[in-house]
Amino acid sequence: MLVLAVPNLFVHMSGRRGYYGPYGRTSARRNENRKNFTVLRQTVRKRLLAKLAEFKAELYRRMHDPVPEVGTWLRSVVTGHFRYYGAPMNSPALGLFRFQVVGHWYRALCRRSQKGRVPWERMKRLIAAFLPPVRLYHPYPLRRLGVIP
């Protein structure tokens, strides 16, 4: 089995699908043909679900705090997640995390009183004001190492 070591990234060339590498990312490869392949660095599902569960518990602790304060906290959580896991080809996992954060926030806002619902028009304004769009912060490995300009 040939192991290609690039800083902070290990890729197994044995044909296995998915390798649990360092930092909570799965490293795999997507074959375009026999000679060319793309390294995929994807978020480990177990770690993503654990982070969402931790986030949900903290959100429900902050449920009755003022909305701008909670929105600012949510921005920092989502931005930190994007900065850590924002590798190329990982945008579906980042989008899923943001989508789940929006859902949990909506349910928490609806549970603040007995009258219940928050209109989606207001929720869209809150999302636009506080949650950043999905962004990839890490460049492709070859671009980072200076192989490709």
Image (tube, helix red, strand yellow):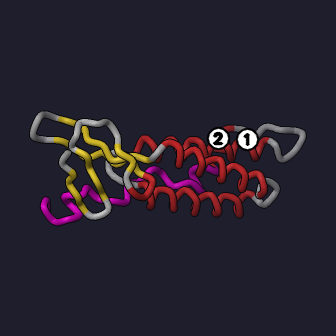
**Label for residue 123?**
none
Between 132 and 48, the one nearer to me in the picture: 48
Q: Quadrant of the N terminus?
A: top left
How crowded pointer 1 is (Cα within 10 Å; few <14, some 14-19, many 20+) is rated as some
Question: Which residue occupies 21% across, 51% down?
Answer: 3
Q: Quadrant of residue 68?
A: bottom right
Q: Secondary structure at mark 2?
A: helix
- The alpha-carbon separation of the residues under discs 1 and 2 comes to 6 Å
Extreme residue in the front direction: 1
Question: Which residue occupies 59% across, 55% down?
Answer: 129
Q: Quadrant of residue 66?
A: bottom right
Question: Which residue occupies 64% across, 51% down?
Answer: 126
Q: Report the residue marked by disc 1.
A: 107
For the residues bearing labels 1 and 2, Cβ distance under 8 angstroms: yes
Q: Give how far across and how far down residue 78 sits, in percent.
A: 55, 56
Question: Which residue occupies 56% across, 54% down?
Answer: 131
Eyeballing the image, is 73 above or below 33?
below
Q: What amino acid is found at the position of numbered circle 2 in the picture?
A: Gly
| In-image side of 92 versus 39 (left or right) | right
Magenta part mainly helix, strand or loop?
Answer: loop
Highlighted range, magenta? 126-149
Q: Secondary structure at mark 1?
A: helix
Q: What amino acid is found at the position of numbered circle 1 in the picture?
A: Arg
Q: Report the residue marked by disc 2.
A: 103
Q: Is residue 147 magenta?
A: yes
Q: Quadrant of the C terminus?
A: bottom left
Q: Give how far across and how far down residue 103 sits, in percent.
A: 64, 40
Q: Give how far across and how far down residue 82 sits, in percent.
A: 46, 56
Extreme residue in the left direction: 35
